[in-house]
Image (spheres, rainbow, N blue to C red):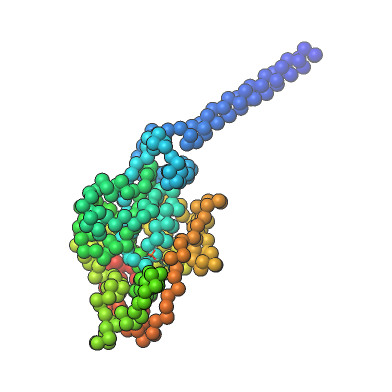
Amino acid sequence: MLFKQQALLRQKLFVLGSLAIGSVLYLVARVGTLDRLQPICPIESRYLSPEPEQIPLRNLQFKRGLLHELRKGNATKEQIRLHNLVQQLPRAIIIGVRKGGTRALLEMLNLHPAVVKASQEIHFFDNDRNYARGIDWYRGKMPFSFPHQITIEKSPAYFITEEVPERIFKMNSSIKLLIIVREPTTRAVSDYTQVLEGKERKNKTYHKFENLAIDTSTCEVNTKYKAVRTSIYTKHLERWLKYFPVEQFHIVDGDRLITDPLPELQLVEHFLNLPPRISQYNLYFNATRGFYCLRFNIVFNKCLAGSKGRIHPEVDPSVVIKLQKFFHPFNQKFYQITGRTFDWP
Ligand code: A3P
């Protein structure tokens, strides 16, 4: 009897022991796997060209950290080599429109783990001297990124500069082009406000908006005034359409990007074939600034500089109406071409 009980106990101990050893072996194997998934070693072989949809977010978050170090200048050449970092030509460009919210759009897209922004406006295609420096100069101005990330730059002058569409086409005829627009009269006033502020900083006087926007001799809208011309979106777009099909453009509603940015960003993610990653968590309204600000993670958040979101001077309502009437037919054409309609007057 005693012998039988002892045998049973031995059997139980054996089973429990096996289970314990099994669990330990499983954990060792699992931790090993997890460890290998942790991005602590060179990653070239792990990231061989998945489509953007397949980018593992956790890994990209790690990449962001490294890229941040790079931007601060802390990453070594060895890290660049080990992590297969490259300077890539942009796969998408925010070509305009000046004062449409181009900086906010770029910064917000940069929240996406698969996007890396060129911090400065490069002005490669609109500036003849830069353009003459060649495509390798342009590439050298791009930030370091991982091969599966996409680089985006913004230079709003591209939209209105004659030579730019052909030059971009020569670089990459299938590039994706983003245009962020605001209600044209508001945009013109914003444009004016920026110039006015520059003059005031230099203690210079400047004309009133009304005197620039309206030709005082004819009382008609002054189409020679650059802030007015830039807001005739359809005229500029038509030049671009000589090179790129309309499907290669995505129009962003700059007014909605101010009041409710997430849906606009989700449309851009879709246009760029990126997995939806930007969420409400990444955007919070800052009442002091009066704008949405960006939250990258629990410790890092930022608002745009004070030069974004200036107070506009009051404009004579009759001039506003005149401008709105002037822009109306151009706006209709713009809606027709792009397939995106706005409730502009
Ligand atoms: P205003 O200064 O007229 O308000 P750009 O970057 O193309 O120069 O555009 C500047 C505009 O971006 C600003 O115009 C501002 O309204 C708009 N904007 C959109 N989202 C913003 C944000 N989250 N923070 C600050 N400005 C933002």
Quadrant of the picture in which ligand 1 is shown: bottom left
Q: Residue at x 34, y 79 (%)?
A: 207
Q: Residue furthest top?
A: 3
Q: Residue at x 46, y 62 (%)?
A: 305
State the residue in front, 144 or 33: 144
- Vertical side of 117 occupied by 18: above or below: above
- Vertical side of 97 occupied by 3: above or below: above
**Residue 332 appears in the rendering:** no
Q: Residue furthest front?
A: 203
Image spot of residue 295 (x, y percent): 51, 55
Please give left or right for residue 62 compared with residue 221 in the image.
right
Q: Residue at x 27, y 55 (%)?
A: 124
**Quadrant assignment for the C terminus:** bottom left
**Residue 106 appears in the rendering:** yes
Please give left or right for residue 123 compared with residue 110 in the image.
left
Image spot of residue 176 (x, y percent): 30, 55
**Quadrant assignment for the N terminus:** top right
Image spot of residue 79 (x, y percent): 42, 36
Please give left or right for residue 62 compared with residue 88 in the image.
right
Image quarter of residue 183:
bottom left
Q: Residue at x 46, y 32 (%)?
A: 41
- Vertical side of 186 occupied by 168: above or below: above
Image quarter of residue 31:
top right
Please give left or right for residue 144 compared with residue 233 in the image.
right
Image spot of residue 252 (x, y percent): 37, 64
State the residue in front, 7 or 172: 172
State the residue in front, 204 or 188: 204
Image quarter of residue 77:
top left
Q: How many marks?
A: 0
